C-alpha cells in the first residue's frame, strides 16, 4: 500500500506537465497527419517461431559486400519501423556503406503503445519472448544475406533503447556492439512499479551490481560488446542519470575504471570514451546538452547528415546514427562490394503519420503523463472520493505498461 501511495503521489506531481505536453502532442500529430513517406523496408515472414509476436523488416542495399555487416534497429513507443527508419536515416547509411538493416516492429496486440516490453521478465531473458524473436530475426538475416557474424550490431531509441540493452546482455555472443539512445540499464525493471521508478526517478546501484545483472543473463564469459550511450541532458521522459548507470553497468562488465580514458568534443557536444588494455575504444557516452527526449540528428546533404526531423527525432547538429556507425567501424570503405538486389520487392506503404510516435510525454512508457489525466486523490486531502485502482489500471493501459 505504501508503494501504491507513492506511485499515486508521483503521478499527481506530473499531471500539469502531462496536460501541457498533450497540447504539444496534438499539434505535432496534426502536422504529421498531412505527411506521407514510402517505406524502404521489406517485411519478412516465417523467420522463426516468433514467441514475442513481432514483425521483421529489412533493407538490403543494391551494393553490399559478399559478407556484409548487419544492424538491428528498434523503434520507440507508438512509432513504426518505417517511420523511425525515415527519421533516423539508417537505411540511407546502409546504402552508402553497404550493410544490411533489420528492424523489429512491435504490434498493438503486445503493447497498446507499441513499446517493446523492456520491463517484463518474460520478454527480456535469453531465449524468451520478444528478445528471442529478435534473435530469430538475426539468425534469419545472417543466413539469408551471408552476414559476417562478427559484425552484428543493435541500436534503439527509448523503449527500443531499453530493449537494446536487453539484447546486449542476453546475447553478448551475438552482438559485436550496441547503441542505447535515451534508454535504461539492463534489468532496471522487471515490473510496472519498477518501470515507473527507473523512468522518473532513476535507480542507483553499484557498478558491480549492475554488471552482475549482465553477467548473469547468459553463460557468456567474454569478449563483451562495445557500447555507445546517448542521452539528452534535458530529457524529461527518461531521467538523464540513466545514461550514467548504463555506463557503470558496462564499464564493470568490461573491467574498466569508472573514470573515462579521455574526453573530447564532437560536433559541439561532449564525448567521453573508455578504452581497454589494448587501447580500443569500447564504451562511449554522448550527453547532448539541452536536448530533450529523442534521437539526435544532423539533417542536411553532407555525408555525415542523415534522416529527417520530427517528434522525438531532433535536429541538434549531430547525427547519432552516423557517429554510432563510425564507432562500430561501419563507415570505413568496404571491400569486395558486389551488386545485388533484394530477393523480394520492398513493401510500399503510405504512412499517414511519419513519426507517429513518441508524442511528448506520451511516448515511451508514457505512464507518467497518461496516468496524470485523472484527478488524483490522497487520504484526508479533502478531494472527492475516487476509485484508485481504476485510475491506476487506466493509466497503465494508456501508457502501454498493461494490456
Image (cartoon, rainbow, N blue to C red):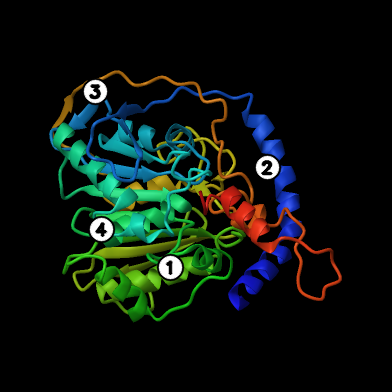
Classify mark 3: helix, strand or loop.
loop
Mark 4 vs mark 1: which is more N-terminal? 4
- Residue 389 % position (x, y): 64, 61
**Residue where numbered disc 4 is placed:** 126
Q: Nearer the viewer, mark 1 or mark 2?
A: 1
**Residue where numbered disc 3 is placed:** 342
**Residue where numbered disc 2 is placed:** 25
- Residue 380 % position (x, y): 81, 76
Residue plotted at (36% across, 67% down): 273
Mark 4 vs mark 3: which is more N-terminal? 4
Q: Nearer the viewer, mark 1 or mark 3?
A: 1
Residue plotted at (35% across, 79% down): 209
Give the CA separation, mark 2 to mark 4: 36 Å
Mark 1 vs mark 2: which is more N-terminal? 2
> Can I make out residue 261 in this image?
no
Mark 2 vs mark 3: which is more N-terminal? 2
Give the CA separation, mark 2 to mark 3: 37 Å
Position of 150 with respect to 28 (left or right) is left
Q: Nearer the viewer, residue 314 or 202?
A: 202
User: From the image, which quarter does the N terminus lie in?
Assistant: bottom right
The relative height of residue 30 versus residue 159 in the rendered view (above or below) is above
> How crowded is the residue under tag 1: few (<14 C-alpha within 10 Å), some, or many (20+)?
many
- Residue 196 % position (x, y): 55, 64
**Residue where numbered disc 1 is placed:** 188
Q: Are marks 1 and 2 in contact (CB under 8 Å)?
A: no
Residue plotted at (41% across, 58% down): 120
- Picture mark count: 4
Classify mark 2: helix, strand or loop.
helix
The relative height of residue 332 versus residue 379 in the rendered view (above or below) is above
The relative height of residue 275 versus residue 259 in the rendered view (above or below) is above
- Residue 358 % position (x, y): 56, 45
Amino acid at each position: 500500500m505504501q508503494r501504491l501511495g507513492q506511485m499515486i503521489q508521483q503521478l499527481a506531481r506530473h499531471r500539469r506537465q502531462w496536460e501541457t505536453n498533450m497540447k504539444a502532442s496534438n499539434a505535432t500529430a496534426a502536422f504529421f497527419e498531412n505527411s506521407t513517406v514510402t517505406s524502404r523496408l521489406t517485411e519478412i515472414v516465417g523467420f522463426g517461431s516468433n514467441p514475442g509476436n513481432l514483425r521483421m523488416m529489412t533493407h538490403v542495399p543494391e551494393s553490399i559486400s559478399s559478407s556484409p555487416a548487419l544492424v538491428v534497429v528498434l523503434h520507440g513507443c507508438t512509432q513504426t519501423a518505417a517511420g523511425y527508419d525515415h527519421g533516423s536515416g539508417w537505411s540511407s547509411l546502409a546504402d552508402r556503406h553497404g550493410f544490411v538493416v533489420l528492424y523489429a516492429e512491435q504490434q498493438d496486440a503486445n503493447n497498446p503503445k507499441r513499446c517493446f516490453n523492456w520491463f517484463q521478465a518474460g520478454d527480456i531473458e535469453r531465449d524468451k519472448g520478444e528478445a528471442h524473436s529478435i534473435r530469430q530475426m538475426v539468425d534469419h538475416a545472417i543466413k539469408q544475406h551471408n552476414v559476417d557474424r562478427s559484425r552484428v550490431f543493435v541500436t534503439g531509441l527509448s523503449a527500443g533503447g531499453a530493449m537494446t540493452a536487453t539484447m546486449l546482455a542476453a546475447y553478448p555472443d551475438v552482438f559485436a556492439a550496441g547503441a542505447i539512445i535515451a534508454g535504461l540499464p539492463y534489468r532496471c525493471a522487471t515490473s510496472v512499479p519498477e518501470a515507473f521508478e527507473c523512468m522518473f526517478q532513476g535507480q542507483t546501484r553499484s557498478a558491480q551490481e549492475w554488471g552482475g545483472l549482465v553477467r548473469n543473463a547468459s553463460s557468456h564469459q567474454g569478449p563483451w560488446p562495445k557500447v555507445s550511450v546517448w542521452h539528452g541532458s534535458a530529457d524529461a521522459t527518461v531521467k538523464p542519470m540513466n545514461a550514467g548507470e548504463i555506463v557503470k553497468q558496462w564499464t564493470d562488465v568490461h573491467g574498466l575504471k569508472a573514470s573515462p580514458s579521455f574526453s573530447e568534443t564532437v560536433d559541439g557536444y561532449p564525448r567521453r570514451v573508455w578504452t581497454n588494455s589494448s587501447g580500443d575504444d569500447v564504451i562511449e557516452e554522448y550527453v547532448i546538452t539541452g536536448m530533450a527526449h529523442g534521437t539526435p540528428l544532423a539533417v542536411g546533404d553532407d555525408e555525415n547528415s542523415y534522416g529527417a526531423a520530427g517528434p522525438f527525432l531532433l535536429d541538434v547538429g549531430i547525427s547519432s546514427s552516423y557517429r554510432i556507425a563510425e564507432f562500430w567501424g561501419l563507415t570505413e570503405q568496404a571491400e569486395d562490394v558486389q551488386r545485388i538486389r533484394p530477393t523480394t520487392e520492398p513493401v510500399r506503404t503510405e504512412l499517414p503519420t511519419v513519426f507517429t510516435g513518441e508524442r511528448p510525454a506520451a511516448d515511451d512508457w508514457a505512464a507518467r503523463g497518461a496516468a496524470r489525466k485523472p484527478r488524483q486523490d490522497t487520504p484526508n486531502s479533502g478531494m472527492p472520493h475516487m476509485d484508485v485502482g481504476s485510475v491506476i489500471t487506466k493509466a497503465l493501459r494508456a501508457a502501454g505498461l498493461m494490456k
